[in-house]
Image (tube, rainbow, N blue to C red):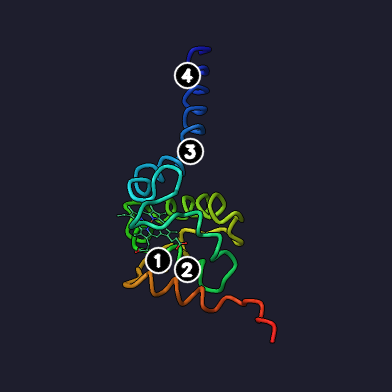
Amino acid sequence: MKGILTAALVLALAATAHADEYEEHDYLLSCSGCHRADGSGSRLVPSLHEMRELAGLPGARQYWVQVPGAAQAPLSNERLAALLNWLVERFAGTAPSPRYTAGEVERLRRAPLRDPIAKRRALLSKAVRPKASP
Ligand code: HEC
């Protein structure tokens, strides 16, 4: 009996530990090949640290799901939502509010962006900048 309880406890702990690692693991497998482990990217792939420029801008939340690398990742809606919550907090410096849910991700990823670079430019152009002094 004691052995069975111990085995059940070990399995439960293992399952918990695994769940906590999903985001980093999914990032490693699905994203880091292009974005690198530290998110710094390369000549052709933007650094995820630049997500800070977009944080808080209208449309950024949707854009981050609809970039092809995210929208088309081989991850369930639940796992992609969890990964994006982790990613935004880590790289944009602030947790998404409200947090992404599987339902929101499912709706957005049905329409991946055809021209993410133009979309990013459009988002930035709407940013309120201090007016130049006359
Ligand atoms: C095949 C290479 C590749 C993979 C794999 C990839 N990405 Fe990307 N990612 C890009 C490129 C290139 C861009 C720039 C926009 C574009 O051309 O899609 C980008 C842009 C982004 C952006 C926008 C950042 C910003 O501030 O403009 C986010 C967020 C992002 N990727 C998340 C992810 C996530 C999450 C994954 C993994 C599930 C992932 N990417 C996998 C290549 C990739």
- The residue sitting at 39% across, 50% down in the picture is 35
Type of amino acid at the residue the image marks with label 2: Gln
Type of amino acid at the residue the image marks with label 3: Ala
Q: Which label's residue is closer to the chain start, 4 or 2?
A: 4
Q: Which label's residue is closer to the chain start, 1 or 4?
A: 4
The answer to which quarter of the image holds residue 106 is bottom left
Q: Which label's residue is closer to the chain start, 3 or 1?
A: 3
Could you give the CA–CA distance between mark 1 and mark 4, rounded to whole angstroms? 43 Å
Residue 19's label in the rendered image is 3
Residue 129's label in the rendered image is none
Q: Circle 2 is placed at which residue position? A: 62
Q: Secondary structure at mark 3?
A: helix
Q: Which label's residue is closer to the chain start, 4 or 3?
A: 4
**Label 3, ligand 1: CB separation under 8 Å:** no
Residue 66's label in the rendered image is 1
Q: Quadrant of the C terminus?
A: bottom right
Crowd class of label 2 (few under 14; some 14 to 19; many from 20; radius 10 Å)? some
Q: Circle 4 is placed at which residue position? A: 7
Marks 2 and 1 close (CB-CB < 8 Å): yes
Type of amino acid at the residue the image marks with label 4: Ala
Could you give the CA–CA distance between mark 3 and mark 1, rounded to whole angstroms? 25 Å
